[in-house]
Amino acid sequence: MKEETSAGSSRWLTAGVIAVIVAIWSLVAALGLFPPSTFPSPLAVVKGFGEEIRSGRLLTDLIASLYRVGIGFTIAAVVGVPLGLWLGVQARVRMALLPLVNFFRSLSPLAWIPFAILWFGIGDAPAVFLIFMTTFFPIVLATTAAVAGIPSIYFMVGREHGFSQRELLSNVVLPAIAPQVITALRVAAGLAWLVVVAAEMIAGRDGLGFAIWDARNGLRMDLLVAGMMSIGLIGVALDRVLIRLSAIPSVRWAYDR
Amino acid sequence: MTDKLIEARGVSHAFGSMEVLSDIDLTIRQGEIVAIVGPSGCGKTTLLNLLSGHITPTSGTIVRHGTLRTVYQKDGLFPWLTVSENIALGLRHVDDPAVRQAQLDEAIALVGLTDFATFYPHHLSGGMRQRTELARALVSRAETLLMDEPFSALDYMTRLHMRHELVRLLHKMPRTVVLVTHDIEEAAQLADRVILLSRRPSRIWKQLDIAAARPRRVTQQEVTHAVRELLSILNLDATGETPALAEEA
């Protein structure tokens, strides 16, 4: 049975849960169970947020992180989707390359950090490289699986209506795989956001990951929590943006069923 | 100009070592409705795919005259296109956009889907989806419709309605139809000729001509008589067992 909850009431519910968590957090902080240096109060975190916003550092870090995710993710999608298409269509190529794709997909992107620093030094490039290595293989794999899963009936219908090879690609393959590719891109963007933080912690001079690491080094747990919150909020916002892709009328069929 | 639209001679087909069809001779003439009936798994769909040219027979020849369209049991519509866009695929041969639009509107109206033209297939009932497929096949210039269990995913009432719809549409836009079905009543109500296939490897086992004019009521004598005759050929009337088929196989 489908539970009926309006968008408004679910928002109130979320707000309520957050209020309860903040209340418990305040209480634990106020009771002084842990020293303030290791357990900042909500008020300290809000002040920390204010400090970071006023200094402009939050915005700079945010832009730096989003830029890296944007570049790494875009390259992975632009190269990964066509490669996945190719693997999906060409059985021989798929047999040759799929084990490799699977191998690299199983490799934690963090294992690439030493090479990322050795090859690209410090800054944008190593983070972009790590994001690419994280997102590229899942995108290729999901696209390949989506192509291989297209019902053969669609190709028969296309051929009966005189579709050329090019039309089969643009009018059958691409719309048929679009929903699965969109889902894969959403998952990949989430992974990219996870990895950029790790990359900046180790190989960055700015960005939200670096901000967290810097706060930890300065024993500023209030700023650290403020950084964590920013990361979480941006992650949710990114997903909200990408989820809009699944509302496109011509891909809704896969989500409505 | 020949009136034979499809001629299959000595057609056999095997998937690997499994022979599905054996030595099929079949001629489809212009304007007739031919039903192909047989037990499930006997290769009816394979025969249809051979007739349409989607697969090539292991041996034998199939000669086709004119173009053909397949109407599938389900999933023959592109789910990413609306009703109107799906039907428009059948009008790709029409160059003039105004003419194409007029024919499209007419076809949509003919199958009673004007109010649903902008709907996607997954928002339609099974019957509406099959009417969309029928419209797409009929607007094309294809002489022959190959129908693969087109109504078997529908409930009985909708199936009766769709048989009626098919006859009505064919009356307006005459076509040659090869109808693959496991539904003996459907075959008796619609077909000029019923071809019974034996068990795998399937051969053409019996043929039955039904002369009554269409539309036929499902209860009218010629139809019930044909159903009885088909059942008795299949030896299905009393027990549901098919010794005749078992012997044949």
Image (cartoon, grey):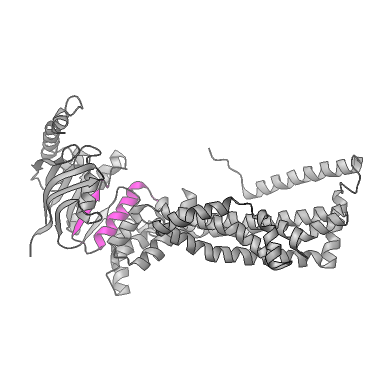
Report the span colored magenta.
B124-150
The image quadrant that residue A236 belongs to is: bottom right
Which residue is situated farthest in the bottom direction here? B96
Q: Residue at x 33, y 64 (%)?
A: B88
A99 vs A236, left or right, is left
Residue A192 in view of the camera: yes
Q: Which residue is drawn at 13% across and 43% down?
A: B194
Q: Closest to the observer: B189 or B51? A: B51
**Closest to the observer, A173 or B79:** A173
Residue B112 spot, x, y in % from top left = 31, 55
Membership of A73 in magenta stretch: no
Nearer to me, A159 or B238: A159
Q: x, y percentage for residue B223?
A: 13, 39
Expressed as whole percent of the image width and height from the top left, the position of residue B16 reads: 26, 45
Tell me if I can see residue A252 in this picture.
no
Question: Left or right: B13 with respect to B99?
Answer: left
Task: Specify whether residue B126 is painted magenta.
Answer: yes
Determine whether A80 is above or below B99 in the image: above
Q: Is residue A243 left or right of residue A251?
A: right
Q: Is residue A25 above or below residue A154?
A: above
Residue at 69% x, 67% y is: A120
Name which quarter of the figure residue B198 lies in: top left
